[in-house]
Image (tube, rainbow, N blue to C red):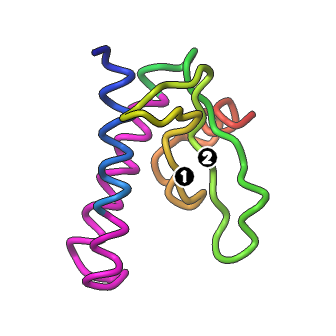
Amino acid sequence: MNDLFKTVERIITLNHAWKVARDEFGADHSITNALRLQKSSWQATLLRSFPSDTYLKRDNENIDGESLLSVRLSKPLNINGHVRNDAEHIPERMARHLFFDDELTDLIR
């Protein structure tokens, strides 16, 4: 199993855990926030470690709530029997916190 696959799998797992924590404990609970931050950190690691395999795409379909970016994969991966073209979403405000402005501009396609 390669590092790209492992990192995407970890992000998906953290995203699932974050949603469970949000539903169970609420959006402002410390566990919920820690999981969200960890997921975003791994997404930044993925984008920086695999620049030819990943990029960001604006999610123009999300009209409810804050602006989101989809962490996209250049080639689909089969993870647990599901073909994945992405590694979940990251709020644009979080991406602006994790990346330099010119870095973020280069990542968005």
Task: Residue under label 2, please give it.
Answer: 70
What residue sits right under mark 1 in the picture?
Answer: 89
Q: Amino acid at mark 1?
A: His
Q: Is residue 48 left or right of residue 39?
A: right
Q: Is 41 above or below relative to 107?
A: below
Where's residue 84, x and y in %?
53, 35
Q: Residue furthest front?
A: 81
Residue 73: image tag: none
User: Residue 52 occupies which quadrant of the picture?
Assistant: top right
Q: Is residue 12 magenta?
A: no
Residue range (magenta):
18-47
Q: Is residue 92 left or right of residue 26?
A: right
Q: How many other residues sit within 10 Å of disc 1, few (<14), some (14-19) or many (≥20)?
A: many
Q: Mark 2 is on which residue type?
A: Ser
- Do callouts 1 and 2 mark residues in contact (Cβ within 8 Å)? yes
Q: Is residue 31 above or below residue 102?
A: below
Name of the residue lying farthest toward the left: 31
Residue 42 is a magenta residue: yes
Residue drawn at 75 percent across, 33 percent down: 109
Q: Is residue 73 above or below residue 39?
A: above
Q: Nearer the viewer, residue 30 or 11?
A: 11
Instruction: Return the x and y of residue 20 as percentages of the image width and height.
Output: 31, 70
